[in-house]
Image: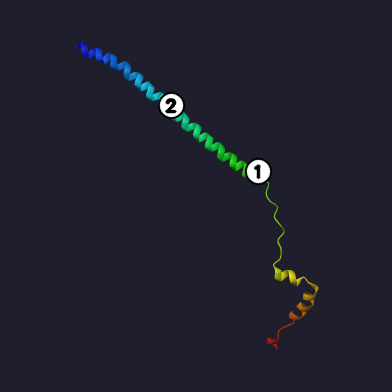
Amino acid sequence: MKLLSCLCQLASPAAVVHHSFRTDVEQGKWDNTRRGVSVIGTFVLFVIFSLEMAPKPKSEPKRKPKSEEHDDHPQNKATDSLTDAPSPEGV
């Protein structure tokens, strides 16, 4: 009986030390997790901010299709008046 009580008295401090060590390890894991999340979050915010602040390319004026570009030519305007005449279908 005396031996059993001596073993319990020795085991109790060992269990407390073991529990304290596990708590410290677990706290270290959570600290590393918080650091990792904050680094990733900072990187994502930096990328978003840099994309928003980047100069936007100036948009080029819209060009007319080639068929419309030829319509502006003076020779084409003279022939356009001929095509505006009413069709003989109505006659």
The quadrant of the picture occupied by the N terminus is top left
Residue beneath the point at 69% across and 86% down: 90
**Is the image coloured rainbow, by chain, by secondary structure, or in one colour?**
rainbow
Given the image, on which type of amino acid does mark 1 rest?
Met
Q: Quadrant of the C terminus?
A: bottom right
Residue 3 lies, with reference to residue 72, above or below; the image says: above
| Secondary-structure class at tag 1 | helix
**Left or right: 46 in relation to 72:** left
Instruction: Please state which amino acid type lies under the numbered disc 2.
Output: Gln
In the current view of this chain or complex, which residue is farthest to the left? 1
In the rendered image, residue 11, in percent from the top left (x then y), is placed at: 28, 17
Residue at coordinates 66% horizontally, 45% vertically from top-left? 54
Percent coordinates x, y for residue 81 in the rendering: 77, 78
| Residue 69, quarter of the rendered image | bottom right
Q: Does residue 89 lie above or below 29 as drawn?
A: below
Residue at 59% from the left image edge and 39% from the top image edge: 46
Tell me if residue 27 comes above or below residue 11 in the rendering.
below
Give the SS element for disc 2: helix
Residue 4, picture quadrant: top left
Provide residue 87's location: percent of width, then percent of height: 71, 84
Q: Mark 2 points at which residue?
A: 27
Q: Mark 2 packing: few (<14 Cα in 10 Å), some, or many (20+)?
A: few
- Drawn side of residue 83 relative to residue 45, left or right: right
Q: Name the residue under label 1.
A: 53
Coordinates of residue 76 in the picture (x, y in percent): 77, 75
Residue appearing at x 70%, y 87% in the figure: 88
Tag 1: Cα neighbours inside 10 Å, few (<14), some, or many (≥20)?
Answer: few
Find the distance from the CA under tag 2 to the CA under tag 1: 39 Å
